Amino acid sequence: MSQPSVLIAGAGPTGLAAALLLDMRGVKVRIVDSALRPAAHSRALVVNPRTLDLLAGTGVTERMLAEGRPVRGVRFHENAEVLATIEATSVHPRYGLTVLSQARSEALLTEALDARGIHIERGVRAGCVGQDDDEVRVALNGASDGEQGYAAVFAADGARSDFRKTLEIGFSGSSYPEPWPLYDVPLQTTLDRDHAHLMFFPEGMIFLLALDDEVWRIISNMPDPLSRLPGGTVSSEPIWESSFHIAHRVADRCAIGRIALGGDAAHVHSPVGARGMNLGIEDAAAFAMLFTAPGAQPMDALQRYHRERHAVHKGVVRRVHAITALARSGNPWVARLRHVAIPWASHMPALSGRILRTVAGLDHPTPTP
């Protein structure tokens, strides 16, 4: 085909992975993004085993492993004492949890696309004009750059997705009222860098993860978490600080006709569990597999994408919501439950394995064509 058959809206990790995996399956793609440049800072920090599996064969997995840093597991703390440790080294036969910034993950995917002659068109906003049995008609930059038809659109255009709004798809769920501060900050600390750390307080929690030998990512639902770090910890001036609000939402449909939603356009949830970027890349892989399945027609492929991915999205967001609610709660009864249940679960392979499979992206079957 001389013209692209699939338009990908959004050049975050979900859109980039979709473009790469579709092109490798012989589908001509076009990828656009309204932003003039990639985001400078990274929300996502962990690449999970499911993502590494799905990108195996693209060359990206090997580069992620070469650049990333393994995480052995998670330690839970309460009242300045280690409450429990759950090790993750045996969660997958080939891959573990790998610390790698979203910015680097996107860069590696972009380089793989460039090597295949596919280049992101930046500063281009795509919007749906209409669709029928033959094609989706898309206006670029409000039609100032023309209107074109495609066999399908994969909308990975973020939590405020224009395509989701145009299709009038609901985004059901709930949100937390409090802001969550975020810091990337150099620390001198006795906390070991091979584990993530979750610290419980009467009024909330702090999550810590070492990005390298000096800089740590800190996320909390309490104000001024840097003042609540373990004794002896010395923090320098933050490299980056921000705050965000957490919502747990799933699109009521993740495909209508010839348009599919992926990534944050289809689901959002807390960073606890490290699933956001990884679940989006899984959406991209599922879309590429189904769209290119032998004998598949675009409309049928997208209907199947909705059936299978919507169930996955609801299950993952439900589990991440439950984990986050347990971690953030200041209710004394919940605190007592944590104090008893977490050490117990850490010594119960069935329970600790279930927690690890959620974090590793292995809590449901791998997408298949």
Image (cartoon, rainbow, N blue to C red):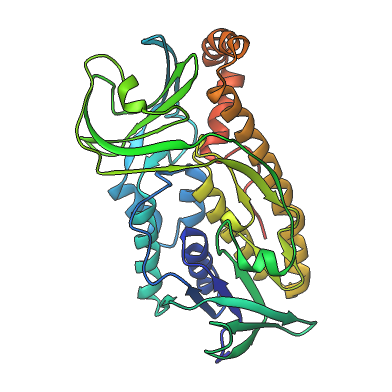
Compared with residue 189, is residue 275 higher up or lower down, i.e. above or below? below
188 relative to 136 in the view: left or right: left
Image location (x, y in percent) of residue 358? 57, 34
Question: In percent of the image, x 55 and y 17: which residue is there?
Answer: 330
Identify the image quadrant of residue 82: top left
Which of these two is toward me, 152 or 62? 152
| Whether residue 306 is visible | yes
Residue 155, position as x, y percentages in the image: 60, 67
Total numbered labels? 0
Q: Quadrant of residue 57?
A: bottom left
* Residue 42 position (above or below residue 338): below
Q: Is residue 57 left or right of residue 364?
A: left
Task: Work out whether 41 lies above or below 151.
Answer: above
Within the image, what quadrant is residue 341 found in? top right
Report the residue at 51% width, 67% height from top: 10
Q: Position of residue 339 (x, y in %)?
A: 53, 9
Q: Does any portion of residue 295 appear in the rendered image?
A: no
Q: Position of residue 290 (x, y in %)?
A: 67, 64
Q: Residue at x 53, y 82 (%)?
A: 141
Q: Quadrant of the C terminus?
A: bottom right
For the N terminus, the image quarter is bottom right
